Structures are given as C-alpha cells and as structure tokens.
Amino acid sequence: MSMHELFQWVIGVIFGLTAVFNVILPFGGLNRLKGTVTDTLPVTPEDFVPEIRLVLFTDSHNQNHHVAKAIDTAYALFDNDAVYPGVDGFFGLGDFSSVGFEGDYVNYVNTLKAHVRPETKCINIHGNHEFKHDEYREFFIRNFGYDPNTVTEINGFSCIAFSGERGATEWTFTANSLKWLSNAITDAEKTANGKAIFVFNHPHPWGTVYGSTVWGDPQLNVVLNGHTSVVDFSGHSHFPLNDPRSINQTTYTAFGCGAMATFETDKDYIPGQHPDGYDPAAQMTIVEADSDGSVHIRGYDLLSDAFICEYYIDNVNDKASFPYTFKNMYAHDTKPVFPENASATARKNEAGEWVISFDEATAAPGYIVHEYRVTIKNDKGLIIYTKNFVDDYFVFDDDRTADFRIGTDTLEAGKSYTAVIRAESAYHKYSCSVSLPFTAQG
C-alpha cells in the first residue's frame, strides 16, 4: 500500500468512527423519538402539478431486459399525461453489472441507447459490483462519456449523482469523494430557491430506510445530515421499495429504490432472507416535484404493471412537518387482521415438500404484513413445528393466500393438525393469533 493509499485509508477510518459516534449510536433512540404524530398520512393533492419527472432503477445485475421494460413503460405511462407529459430523466443507481467487466458496461449502455430517447437525460452511477474491477473509473468514462460524480440541472432542479471512489475496499468511499458530495450539496443549496435537491447514490445512508442497517454506509450520513432539502435515493440492499420503511425522514429524506434483479428481505431482524417469490424482481421509482418544495414519489412494479406505493411531501424544506419519520409511520401502522372465515390447507408439491396455505392477514392501507409466525400442533396438541416465514408482499397477483414450505417429512398424509398463526406488520405490530385446523392432503 502506497503512502497515498494509506492516508486515504486512515481518513476513511476517521470518517467511519465519526459516523459511529455521531450517527449510528444516537439513531436507535433519538431519531426514533423525533417528529410529530399527525392525524393522517399525506394524500397527494389533486391540484399538484409537477415541474420535473424522473424515473429511477437500481441493481439490475445484467438483467437488461428489465431496464428496457422500465424505460419503455415510463414513456408509455407519461407520454400522454394530461397534467405533465413526458419523462425528464432516467437515473440508474448502480450494480448494473455483476463483477464489473467492461462487457457489462457495453451491454447496459447499448440497452440505454436503444430505449432512451435523445432528448431525455440519462445518468448512471457506480455500485459496489462495478467497484470489483480495478478499472472501474476508466470503464465508466469510456462507456458513459461523463464523470462518475456529476451534477445535472434538469428544469432548475439539481440532480447530484454520486458514485464516490473505491477506498481501501469496495465498501468505503474516499475522503476526497465525500468532500465532493458535500460541496455539491452546498452549491445546490445556494440556487435551490425552495426546490428539493436530489441526490443519487448506491448504498443507503445508514439507519434510515429498510435494509440500511446492513446495506448502508454511515459515511453518507456524515455528509447528508442537516441538509433538509435533500431527497436521497439509493439501492444496494435489494429490499422491496413497497415496504413502507423504504421511506424515512430525519434531518433529510431518504428513499430506497428496491431492485431490478432479485429481492432480499430480513427475518427476525436478520438480513439475507430469500423467501419464495424473491426472484425475479423489477421495481422502479417515479419522482415528481414542483418549485415550492413538494415531492411526489411512487413505486411501480414492472412484473405486474401496477403502481405499488405512493408518498407525498408537501414541503421538503420544513423538517418540523416531515410526515415520514419513524415515529409517525409507526404510529399509523396497525395490527394485521385475519378474515373471520380464515382457513388453512396442507398439500405436497412436486418436490415432495409440504406446503401450508392459509388466508392471509390484511395490513393497514399503505402498509404490509411482513411475516408470519406459524406453529403446527398434532391431534394431541403437541407442537411439532414452529417457524417464522417472510410473506411475499413484494409479489403482486390475485392470490390472497400465504403459502410456505415446511419440508418433506413434517406431516403425515391423512392426519389432522392445527396451525396457530400470528401476523407481523412492517413496524412489528402483531395480530391476534388464529388457530386453523387442517388435514394433510398427501
């Protein structure tokens, strides 16, 4: 390691320690207590007229057909919009590659060229998977034609695309790149005139949106904290954007943009879970704003061709009125409720695994059932199986049952059992348990 690299590493450690003591430790208590509990969550006003529309996607990992569909779908949705027609910009938030080979850049850029119209801005950034190759910067400039860290003005809005630079590992940024981001935000604030400032980076700011406590970078918090007009968009975690925890407001606004390849979730606070239905994934984010500080964010699922979530911030500059704080979102979440006639069945699939199916619980509007606790008792009342299952809330279809595999030899065909099930919401609120008798159908 050269002296310059050693210096950069030491600076990175200092940034990291600063984040630990100034960001991570207080977050668990202080930030969750901050904010005002409102009577209701915001509804987008009928007279809201955007002055910019951006479409974002992230973590496509060579699934370029999903990228193509996102672009084509966005044009189809908004070309003839009666209020504000068109798309002003597409932003790719990194991990378009798997291991950073230049061929991945070429294929991705060719997809963009084939689908993005010449008059539409299209800006991309690096993800950690691009950082896996030592020539990441050279590949980027050669194929995209602009710097990985760039500021683009669109309709008077500052759009700050931050790739950073790889530090001692692919997981850290250098001090110089973080200084660039800080300066870019400060410069944007001088000319914002009440408009939101959009920042795009690959990892989440730590301890903000869903997935950020594992797939977040605390160095970003050090830069972003206190810049109230900033709306930060990120990817990296692959955590579904329709989980209401994918938006979070502290001293600024953070939003997690899901994924375009596969989903990841957590279970019992442990990340790395891949429940049934996690593959494929294709979610994009639509961002609209006006010059008065209003921001309208919607999530769209490309596999079902449907809008899946919506958020509205009346004035991004007014921290005191932020509606999407942890405290306020927790207050408006409620216990999931099972239907009165809920029932359960058990059958074997083609692989010989027992599949338990039961009528799913209902969450509060705009919220989700995140997981279920399932306990199975035999006809003597003895517990033979207990486990938590993450619900497939990121799959949008007409199926109103929850289905979970429990192995090949847990049940015996023809025998009677009882499933005791409890549903858990996004903010860890629990339903009443229901007891559902069923007979194993071999």
Image (cartoon, helix red, strand yellow):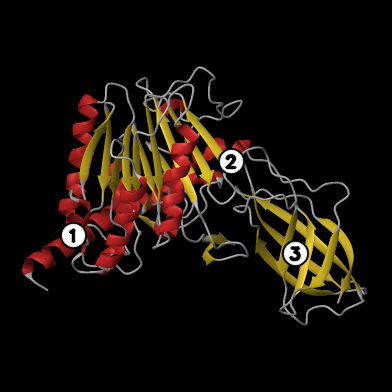
Q: Furthest-top residue in view?
A: 47
* Mark 3 vs 1: CB contact within 8 A: no
Q: Furthest-bottom residue in view?
A: 409
Q: Where is residue 307 drawn, in percent x and y?
A: 56, 40
- Disc 1 crowd, CA 10 A, few/some/many (<14, 14-19, 20+): some
Residue 20 in view (yes/no)? no
Q: Where is residue 21 drawn, in percent x and y?
A: 32, 52
- For numbered disc 2, what is the local secondary structure? helix
Dot 1 or dot 2, earlier in sequence:
1
**From the viewer's perspective, is 118 left or right of 207?**
left
- Disc 2 crowd, CA 10 A, few/some/many (<14, 14-19, 20+): some
Q: Pick the residue in front: 411 or 20.
A: 411
The residue at the point 63 percent across, 40 percent down is 333
* Mark 1 vs 2: CB contact within 8 A: no
For label 1, the residue is 137
Q: Where is residue 17 drawn, in percent x and y?
A: 27, 57
Which residue type carries mark 1? Arg
Dot 3 or dot 1, earlier in sequence:
1
For label 3, the residue is 374
User: Comparing marks 1 and 2, which lies closer to the viewer?
Assistant: 1
Q: Quadrant of the C terminus?
A: bottom right
Q: Where is residue 317 drawn, in percent x and y?
A: 36, 26
Q: Quadrant of the N terminus?
A: bottom left
User: Comparing marks 3 and 1, which lies closer to the viewer?
Assistant: 1
> Residue 330 shows which numbered tag?
2
Q: CA distance from mark 3 to mark 2?
A: 24 Å
The residue at the point 86 percent across, 57 percent down is 343
Which residue type carries mark 2? Tyr
